[in-house]
Image (cartoon, grey):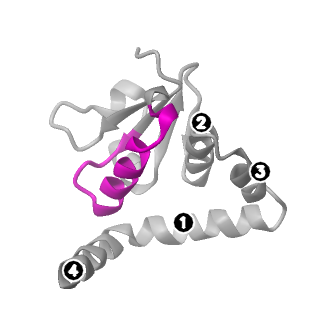
Amino acid sequence: MLPHRLRYFTMATAPFCQQEVAWLEKHRPREHIALVDIQARDFNAQVYGQEFNAMMGQLHLRDSPGKWYIGMDASRALYAVLGYRRLVRFSCLPGVHSIMNAGYRFFARRRIWLGQWWEKRQTKC
């Protein structure tokens, strides 16, 4: 196991994942995050005790003790490691928490379509 605080399971070919990885590279605490490409040929979700389709459907992070963070909770864990603790606390407030979780689920279900739309839009600019 790597000495990182978090393992960030990403799809290297997905447009929004590429954007987030590029954004991560600009952060100093980046060395605390190991990127794992779930679309790599040698990736096996079962090695991590997960189902591949579930990992494709929502963001997954695992901390060094082995605790899983999925969906919006994964985003919160990632932002906390990067130092955005105020944003994380705000996203946990009553009402805001539910809205953020619902927004994430809405995005996650449509991310492939949104990614394709985003790429087309970028090529037009």
First in sequence, mark 2 or 3: give its number. Answer: 2
Outermost residue on the left side: it is 41
| Mark 3 nearby-residue class (10 Å; few <14, some 14–19, many ≥20) | few
Query: Where residue 55 is drawn, which disc sits there?
Result: none
| Extent of the magenta region | 9-30
| Mark 1 nearby-residue class (10 Å; few <14, some 14–19, many ≥20) | some
- Distance between the alpha carbons at the discs numbered 3 and 1: 20 Å
| Mark 4 nearby-residue class (10 Å; few <14, some 14–19, many ≥20) | few
Residue 116 at x, y percent in the picture = 25, 74
Residue at image x 61%, y 41%? 77
The residue labelled by disc 4 is 120
Residue contact at pointers 2 and 1, CB within 8 angstroms: no
Residue at image x 47%, y 43%? 60
The residue labelled by disc 3 is 89
Residue 29 at x, y percent in the picture = 51, 32
- Distance between the alpha carbons at the discs numbered 4 and 1: 23 Å
Tell me the amino acid under the disc marked 2. Val
First in sequence, mark 2 or 1: give its number. Answer: 2
Q: Residue 10 or 4: which is nearer the viewer? A: 4
Quadrant in the rendering for residue 74: top right
If the image is split into quadrants, where does the N terminus sit?
Answer: top left
- Distance between the alpha carbons at the discs numbered 2 and 4: 32 Å
Query: Where residue 81 is drawn, which disc sits there?
Result: 2
Name the chief secondary structure element in magenta: helix
Q: Secondary structure at mark 1?
A: helix
First in sequence, mark 4 or 1: give its number. Answer: 1
Tell me the amino acid under the disc marked 4. Lys
Q: Secondary structure at mark 4?
A: helix
- Distance between the alpha carbons at the discs numbered 2 and 1: 22 Å
Residue at image x 70%, y 50%? 88
